[in-house]
Amino acid sequence: MTEIDPALTLPDEASDADRERALRAGLAEYELADDDLALLDGVDGGARLEAAARALPVLAVIGRPNVGKSTLVNRILGRREAVVEDKPGVTRDRVSYPAEWSGTHFTLVDTGGWEVDVAGIEARVAEQAEVAIGLADAVLFVVDATVGTTNTDEQVVRLLRKAGKPVVLCANKVDGPAGEADAFALWSLGLGEPYPVSALHGRGTGDLLDAVLDALPEISEHGVLRPDGPRRVALVGRPNVGKSSLLNKVVGAERVVVHEVAGTTRDPVDELVELKGKPWIFVDTAGIRRRVHQTSGADFYASLRTQAAIEKAEVAVVLVDASVKMTEQDTRVISQVVEAGRALVIAYNKWDLMDEDRRPFLEREIEQDLVQVQWAPRVNVSARTGWHTDRLVPALERSLESWDTRISTGRLNAFLGELVAAHPHPVRGGKQPRILFATQASTRPPRFVIFTTGFLDPGYRRYIERRLRETFGFEGTPISISVRVREKRRR
């Protein structure tokens, strides 16, 4: 169980309850929105709101190179987010964005990361589409109406039919009535009505998005985690860090082919394994580890597959090669886990290959590159020899316990009262914001909402998070703190 920091002496439960009632009654003097009231009406109501936010349906935008996918993504978002350039292969880093249409919120996945290698383009299109379809609740398939269907388009159509996901067909680059005949020719794909659109000018995007909302479910199938059963683990990391070898060593059998073949495909399969007498599910590890020897698009495909595995998991083990310098891709994978709100364990693999000269450099890299995730358990292992792999399960259990931790409202407010008394918020512009009330909206991960009379400085928010971790633990889980500034009712 979590230990209480002796620096903060919390009152007993009766005092906590009295404080909660008093502070809650004081909120009646302030203007509260409907979602505030839903949150305050009970833990369950707040948790449902947070769960709905986490389980937004996912729309993947797919299509061959240079059909205008990123332009369409920017049009849907109403802002320039995706990189747009008049050549294929320019989208690389972030691939998912929060989107909204007609009051409905969903997650938009831009799959514009294409290979420029013409000889292998069809294989890359199929691979990218395969990953995107697996991520999505519905697919927006973009075709260039001025070019018509190609062999690559037909290959993607076969994948779509096999997956059985809802598909909305976008006939892009229809800039006027004269081009609508080209759009209607796309009925031949057998995917239903093609929606003529000009992503560049916005023509027809309203009708397209209405069709998208009809295709999307209210809550994503991928976003709802099973409350019972074996805990779900994703082994993630950049290529060749030893994911397959580690899984084989932990399981104690050659369950995974370690020798990789470039371009191989395999349907994602969750693997049920027993570790220390308990069942665990390793999520889609095959899909992550099968694409190793790739060229310029490796980062993009790894990002998509990593995201797919993380979304289906409860906790992620991010493997880092301890024997070489950490890369931007390592830190990006860790950021994906944190942004997805999953529990986290960092495993430094290939420890047997690290000499004494390397150790101080690694410690410096951890201090500099991982300063935002000092709360994550570290496990130093060697997948090749099996050294310290027995420490992986206890680290997973600690992270998941923190991920599930809930603090009572009374105790949370007592903690904040002690914290503010010991370290008040700085005065800004002659005013000092006051914390009125706080509650934990949900777990998995822990999310806190603080009602205040003014904005809290980012530094003070970080101070609250640090003291929350010191007092209640939260080892191995991201926590989020949102501040709702409320004004007094006008009499």
Image: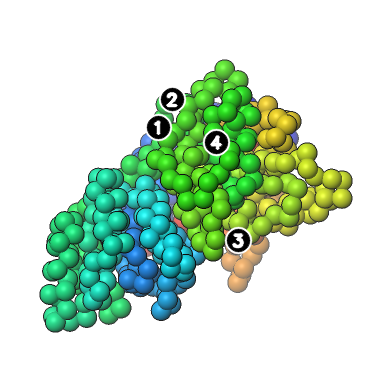
- Of labels 2 and 3, the one closer to you: 2
Residue position marked by numbered label 2 in the rendering: 229
The amino acid pointed to by label 4 is Val
Q: Do the residues labelled 1 and 2 touch (CB within 8 Å)?
A: yes
Question: CA–CA distance between discs 4 and 1?
Answer: 28 Å
Residue density around tag 3, few if under 14, some if 14–19, many if 20 or more, within 10 Å: few
Q: Which of marks 3 and 1 is in front?
A: 1
Identify the amino acid type marked 3: Pro
Q: Circle 2 — which element? A: loop
According to the picture, the residue beneath numbered tag 4 turns out to be: 257
Task: Residue 119 in the image: state x and y as whole percent.
Answer: 43, 65
Label drawn at residue 302: none
Residue 226's label in the rendered image is 1
- Using the image as rendered, state which of residue 473 and residue 450 is in the foreground: 473
Is 63 on the left or on the right of 24, as rendered? Answer: left
Residue at position x 26%, y 58% from top?
154
Mark 1, Cα crowd under 10 Å, few <14 / some 14-19 / many 20+, is few
**Marks 1 and 4: in contact by CB < 8 Å?**
no
Q: Which residue is drawn at 72% across and 41% down?
A: 350
Number of marks present in the image shown: 4
Q: Which of 281 and 156 is in front in this view?
A: 156
Q: Could you tell me the amino acid type at mark 1?
A: Arg
Q: Is residue 251 visible?
A: yes
| N-term mark: 4 or 1 | 1
Position of residue 127 measured from the top left corner of the image (x, y, whole percent)? 41, 53
Element type at mark 3: helix
Left/right placement of residue 80 relative to residue 411 reads left
Instruction: Say what secondary structure mark 4 lies in.
Output: loop
Mark 2 residue type: Gly
Residue topped by disc 3? 458
Q: Which residue lies furthest to the top in this view?
A: 277
Separation of residues labelled 2 and 3 (CA atoms): 38 Å
